[in-house]
Image (cartoon, coloured by chain):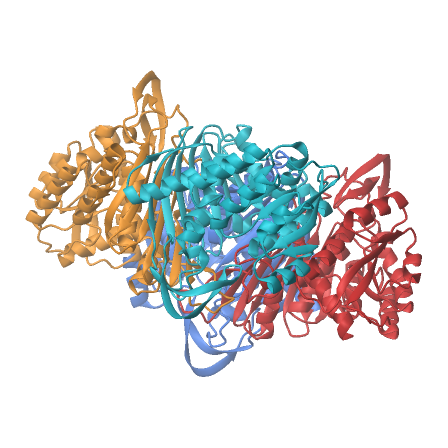
Chain colours: A blue, B red, C cyan, D orange
Amino acid sequence: MVGLTSKEVRIGMVGYQFMGKMHSHAYRDIPFFFDPKVKPVLQAISGRNESAVKEAAEKMGWASYETDWRRLIERDDIDVIDIVTPNHTHAEIAIAAAEAGKHIITEKPLALTVEEAERMYEAVKKANVTHMICHNYRFVPAVQYARKLIEEGRLGRIFHVRANYLQDFIIDPSFPLVWRLKKEVSGSGALGDIGAHSIDLARFLVGDFKELVSTMETFVKERPIGEMSGGLSAKAEGDEMGEVTVDDATCFLARFENGALGVFEATRFAGGNRNKNKFEINGEKGSIRWDMENMNNLEVYFADDEPGLQGFRLINVTEEVHPYVGAYWPAGHIIGYEHSFIHLLYEFLNGIVEGTSPKPNFEDGVINQKILAAVEKSAETKQWITL
Amino acid sequence: MVGLTSKEVRIGMVGYQFMGKMHSHAYRDIPFFFDPKVKPVLQAISGRNESAVKEAAEKMGWASYETDWRRLIERDDIDVIDIVTPNHTHAEIAIAAAEAGKHIITEKPLALTVEEAERMYEAVKKANVTHMICHNYRFVPAVQYARKLIEEGRLGRIFHVRANYLQDFIIDPSFPLVWRLKKEVSGSGALGDIGAHSIDLARFLVGDFKELVSTMETFVKERPIGEMSGGLSAKAEGDEMGEVTVDDATCFLARFENGALGVFEATRFAGGNRNKNKFEINGEKGSIRWDMENMNNLEVYFADDEPGLQGFRLINVTEEVHPYVGAYWPAGHIIGYEHSFIHLLYEFLNGIVEGTSPKPNFEDGVINQKILAAVEKSAETKQWITL
Amino acid sequence: MVGLTSKEVRIGMVGYQFMGKMHSHAYRDIPFFFDPKVKPVLQAISGRNESAVKEAAEKMGWASYETDWRRLIERDDIDVIDIVTPNHTHAEIAIAAAEAGKHIITEKPLALTVEEAERMYEAVKKANVTHMICHNYRFVPAVQYARKLIEEGRLGRIFHVRANYLQDFIIDPSFPLVWRLKKEVSGSGALGDIGAHSIDLARFLVGDFKELVSTMETFVKERPIGEMSGGLSAKAEGDEMGEVTVDDATCFLARFENGALGVFEATRFAGGNRNKNKFEINGEKGSIRWDMENMNNLEVYFADDEPGLQGFRLINVTEEVHPYVGAYWPAGHIIGYEHSFIHLLYEFLNGIVEGTSPKPNFEDGVINQKILAAVEKSAETKQWITL
Amino acid sequence: MVGLTSKEVRIGMVGYQFMGKMHSHAYRDIPFFFDPKVKPVLQAISGRNESAVKEAAEKMGWASYETDWRRLIERDDIDVIDIVTPNHTHAEIAIAAAEAGKHIITEKPLALTVEEAERMYEAVKKANVTHMICHNYRFVPAVQYARKLIEEGRLGRIFHVRANYLQDFIIDPSFPLVWRLKKEVSGSGALGDIGAHSIDLARFLVGDFKELVSTMETFVKERPIGEMSGGLSAKAEGDEMGEVTVDDATCFLARFENGALGVFEATRFAGGNRNKNKFEINGEKGSIRWDMENMNNLEVYFADDEPGLQGFRLINVTEEVHPYVGAYWPAGHIIGYEHSFIHLLYEFLNGIVEGTSPKPNFEDGVINQKILAAVEKSAETKQWITL
């Protein structure tokens, strides 16, 4: 483990696209809005295309760059490895980083397989470094507040969770076969990319999964070869077609250890839903509803409200009493998507100083990976799978 | 079959509680708002408690009453038997009515078992009478309009349906063990009472079910003995407890013949949802969302709307161009729950004159019953069931 | 005054279009759902077009008809005169009815002028008959419940009311010059037709107006001659144009006796709003929001809710504890526009037996008329007008 | 005017509280997300309390600080003066800055009086520097998009604008008499603080005001002496009371040059509305609705949508075709309040290089100030005021 002798921690980030931009921005904003126990220094990023990585480093304020991530890990002036590359690279990079004693933060899902995930977790445990996985939605203030209400027993015994993560960016069959649609690179499709978030949120809010049954579908089985052109946009490179090897949509039923029932759906084929990440939780004493498209709002129902005056309260989670948001603007002035990463990485920085690995960490990553694997196995075998 | 020599058809209704009141009201309103091919005459109702049935007849405008439904069927001055009694009585009454040549309308679900349902369907076919089952939600104007859009291909190939029917009236463990919670009377719990509606709507809007997998749960396993006191209210009769023999909640995944995926949930344990019957359908060209609590609204998304201006349209389905509503008030003046029954029974009356059995009829009832049975079997066996 | 020696009261209705249909339906439904102290008998309607009035009588269940409203008033077998004709006829009919000792219910606004309204009120007082005016929105359960909360002090001192009544049915300049657009028949345009409802609601919920300032506009100054064809639809009769002599839109600011500020807007030129009758009320302890397009919902905010959990509650006003709705269906099963008339006329029938004139009655009609007149005068003089 | 010989422009900011934090953050984010023609350098801030200003400079990343704003203006290494101090200081600082040839950006409202505002505008014109005023809401992507639709004629002739800016942070009478409640410091209360935004938005979207009539109210006339403690929070300093000399609420009606009617309301007494800045615009061909609490959404209605399918579209203004948002995240990933300042200051920086003063600039500030003055004069005189 890197001994922290100063009040700064030097970040080395592998990758620099959508999530690289997001993490870079978050590191810059953390000390502006919060007082982390250590300040992040944007030390270096790596990428294979030199001109592109150089441009990215300049644009985003990184002090240097490398064209091989191995070089990043070798450098003594790097304390943290932040992994924002496609999923199939996470394991190799993370294990090498752990062996070099770097603290590690990685995008989700942790790995392509449970075996990989477990090796990663072993590596960070052995190295005794701080580790986290970027399930950023946990850190939306409304979600944190939902967790607080549940922990305090305000919902009582939980009966139901229903979680949808709906997108629509690949409905058009001419959308190309980007890396997110290749199993060997991404591990899975809608399941691992967005369903993984719903799984993590359910574990955060409801508890441990016990068993599940699933079904998966690939509605468009062939697509033109092509690449991402930024964010979730992409363009085809020609007429050549390739096979889509991941799920377009995954649905599953689950039972939780505490007796709750879960209904989950992750799809990229729900027209009109650009990024509809939502959940509802029903308990004996109350219910909660949340939707990322209105991420500052939390709907809360209490069964013991006065008769006649019972109904979901639309709470704008932007007040000083709410988690994190006191650092920003007055009540009612909403924040956006990027703030969930600011909060997550703020906790990560504090964890480094405290010698802890705030949740969700690699242990959570392994558990989530097992659930992803169970979902896939259930879809193949058409059986319920016990976790 | 009763020959219709006049412009009136004489109704005999078995039962007179919640749904009896609803049907009575609908018959009274039909000729006021519409021009049915035949006018309903509220001829007689039957019930075992003479003072109660007499009072109900007077209150609701029925010309006479009986204390035995068999007497109703024997009467020559009755053309139609309308069955609004608990589920376990449907088969016997319907078969007797069919044998007596009466046209039949019955509340849902059709029966307790597939075998019963099939016998009922055989009986009406043999008698050549008009028959329907009261899946009233099909007849909400917004739902009819959704169907029209789908039939016209406005949504294209269907990928997804997600349907929730959420209630919360029995969360309190002191809510008594009413007939709706006894398998021998109701057949099933949330599944048959409300899930059956979602199933019928999915068949109406998406098409035939191919296979499904389910899970069911009874969260409160014992309740005090007691009876319904009207609507969905009830009171316990004392300290004696009895076993709840039906599901409090049922969730299932389905695949449709046309390749669509379905996610269904029916529960009486979703706090804050008094009667939240909702669905979303996603297709290649568009999506639809609907919710009974705002039943006059339909949300419609079209993928081919101008870029930048794409989004769900909130349509108030109260205009002359929309189904049924031209019979009422000017655009924007909303209608309520009861109108779905007015429309359904209006179609039933026309069916009698035309010699047809408008959908959903007993054939649909049988199919729905098979799906209900498959859901129960899947929950028991933990297997996918092919329909 | 007609002595009520039986348990029935015989209605004579002048007019039979949109509101005639509405009132007829309400009378039919009242004894079905409620237990009024006296039952209404649909005795006779009148209209100048014999074939049309005859057809309407048959369709709506009236026992007889007349082609001259004066004949209706002469008849001994009529206890109540219900006036649903255009506004310019209200005064003459109501005064004649009062002089004949009939109880009177009339559509709004009461009259064309304050002077007329006052004569009408004098006549009913002198005749000692029961009188009401059909400001039906008071009788929506959510509105009644809002009133109850305010009366109980749950909102504390009232600071603000903002009320919009937005329609869009005459934006198209080819919509014809129907009676609603002629001052000599309707008295005013958006102001008297829909703004009058907002005024009555504000008086009901907030209290007495003290002073106001207004502006009015006629956006389309000429239209083709034509007639209503039902509801709010209409068709032009040819190429001939006529002058629109009423307001298309009226806006005004008001101060109330209790210190509250009011902002009002009534318009038929707000595209996308078929019948958006809405208000918000803000008080020291809480706030209320309501919208007729979702009439079963009431949004309520309490300032003393627990910090962090403050927000508007979305209450579905369909529970037994809520006004009127216990007479219908279980909680969550919504009712529609027509029920507001059922409740109003139910109170009217009870008032006849009790010898009272439930509010809003002709006294309210006079006060409302004075406010309408003040709005018009302010628009002309560009001065604040004290009431 | 400062000649720009480099690709950097050096900012000197007067003040460092709520808006100072906001502007600082925006300058940091601009080059990260956009490619401005010149990069901002956070050169120096000024404030009277040395320890506080020093701490703020460090926290927010400013290179230096001053304890007297005059010193900031004297410095040669400052190209821009950014004024985020209370309103009564804007004029003196801006005029001095202009005379020193600095480009100027100031918070709104421009000044306390029209006379002050005009002197400021004269000064910047004479100095030929770039100038803007921070009406940030113009720069919310949904608002920019609304403007684009209106400019393209998609709404046709405009009939109505209704704009509310509702807050509730001073309803409690124990909230202290902070600077925002003192006329000599703030100029006015709700009117200048939030109503000014609605006025600017109306000018941006609808056009020039022609005349108006208003009413203003101070519901709580005395408050304990006290100060802001950050954002919109504050605490009393003791028992001493002082007079509130500004409006708690202002309502006004307006007529626009193009014939549209406007209804405006600004209040800090609308419980449950933390920062509800909303507007609706109705035109011949369509309507628009927007609300800052859901700032990424724009509701758009088109009258020429297919009959039956007309309704407000809920557009998530986060797509590449929408203004500014292509610089951030994929569609559906929402942004927050602070981005409106990023966009505004991005335009300001470009204006410096281009030698222009993007709107809204001091000329708009003068016009807005005249409207604020007219609102106040109308409230005093109870007359319509022509602009």
Q: Quadrant of the N terminus of chain C?
A: top right
> Is residue A165 visible in the rendered structure shown here?
yes
Measuring 17% from the left and 45% from the top, which residue is drawn there?
A: D366
Q: Nearer the viewer, residue D134 or C200?
A: C200
Q: Quadrant of residue D172?
A: top left
Q: Nearer the viewer, residue D4 or A283?
A: A283
Q: Nearer the viewer, residue A179 or C37?
A: C37
Q: Quadrant of the C terminus of chain C?
A: top left
Measuring 86% from the left and 46% from the top, which residue is drawn there?
A: B54
Q: Is residue D330 above or below residue D275?
A: below
| Residue C52 location (% of width, % of height) | 60, 63
Q: How many marks?
A: 0
Q: Quadrant of residue B45?
A: bottom right
Q: Is residue B136 above or below residue C205?
A: below
Is A251 on the left or on the right of D180, as rendered?
A: right
| Residue C354 location (% of width, % of height) | 67, 32
Which residue occupies the extreme top position in the image?
D239
| Residue C305 location (% of width, % of height) | 52, 32
| Residue A73 location (% of width, % of height) | 40, 56
Is D154 on the left or on the right of D65, as rendered?
A: right
> Is residue A257 visible in the rendered structure shown here?
no
Which residue occupies the extreme bottom position in the image?
A239
Q: Nearer the viewer, residue C37 or B352?
A: C37
